Image: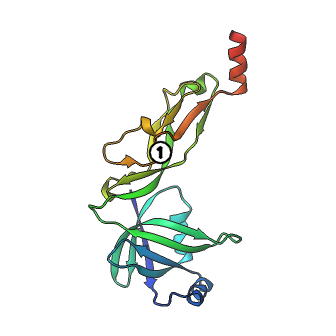
């Protein structure tokens, strides 16, 4: 898992006027949960670009008033019209306490079903994973080489030693669908 460094400044004014003034200065109000007490702070909006607009999942190292916190991004709020970032929530992590995060799924290999004329479809792009921070994966790589026509990979088909997937067991992650051409070929073969 990769680490992202982020500097912020503590804030004491928490009302609507104070957050509006922060946003006018190009800063985003944030809250860090999970510690002994919640920490309210603000970060520069431009500093968040590489953290938010990437498929990579990061552990965020926050530098606030001389203190350092390790956290994961929990929730993100966007403006409904302009799509500007309105608010960010972070969750403080510790080495021995498990955390739940969404991790991207990556497919690897050339599926048998695709060779037979099917179409490979990635249904779920991210899975919720529960693990201690040291064992959190950056991505989940699934081998689809043996996936035939009409077959799928579900959450219940996966098991990992160092982390647990907490999505529902029947959720389909990837599947090979029959295309019209493959159905027509199957009909002609009969």
Please indicate whether residue 132 sits to the left or right of residue 84 in the image: left
Query: SS of the residue at dot 1?
Result: loop
Please indicate whether residue 159 sits to the left or right of residue 54 in the image: left
Q: Nearer the viewer, residue 130 or 95?
A: 130
Q: Is residue 48 visible?
A: yes
Q: Nearer the viewer, residue 141 or 31?
A: 31
Q: Position of residue 81 (x, y in %)?
A: 71, 70
Q: Position of residue 83 (x, y in %)?
A: 66, 69
Query: Within 10 angstroms of label 1, few (less than 14), some, or many (20 or more) residues?
Result: few
Residue at point 49%, 46% (across, down): 105
Q: Quadrant for the N terminus, please.
A: bottom left
Q: Position of residue 100 (x, y in %)?
A: 40, 57
- Answer above or below: position of 16 versus 141: below
The residue to which callout 1 is attached is 168
Q: Is residue 138 visible?
A: no
Q: Quadrant for the C terminus, please.
A: top right
Q: Residue 16 occupies which quadrant of the picture?
A: bottom right
Q: Residue 112 occupies which quadrant of the picture?
A: top right
Residue at point 35%, 79% (across, down): 37
Q: Residue 178 occupies which quadrant of the picture?
A: top right
- Answer above or below: position of 95 versus 130: below
Residue at point 54%, 88% (across, down): 15
């Amino acid at each position: 898992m990769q680490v992202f460094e982020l500097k912020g400044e503590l804030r004491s004014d928490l009302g609507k006027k104070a957050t509006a003034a922060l946003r006018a200065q190009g800063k985003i109000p944030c809250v860090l949960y999970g510690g002994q007490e919640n920490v309210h702070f603000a970060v520069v909006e431009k500093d968040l670009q590489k953290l938010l607009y990437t498929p990579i999942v990061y552990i965020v190292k926050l530098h606030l008033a001389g203190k350092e916190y390790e956290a994961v991004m929990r929730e993100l709020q966007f403006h409904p019209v302009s799509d500007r970032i309105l608010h960010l929530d972070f969750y403080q992590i510790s080495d021995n306490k498990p955390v739940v995060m969404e991790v991207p799924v990556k497919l690897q290999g050339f599926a048998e079903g695709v060779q037979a004329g099917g179409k490979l479809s990635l249904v779920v792009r991210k899975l919720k994973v529960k693990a201690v921070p040291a064992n959190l994966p950056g991505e989940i790589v699934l081998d689809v080489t043996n996936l035939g026509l009409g077959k799928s990979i579900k959450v219940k088909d996966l098991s990992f030693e160092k982390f647990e997937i907490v999505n529902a067991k029947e959720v389909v992650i990837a599947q090979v669908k029959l295309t019209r051409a493959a159905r027509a070929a199957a009909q002609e073969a009969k």
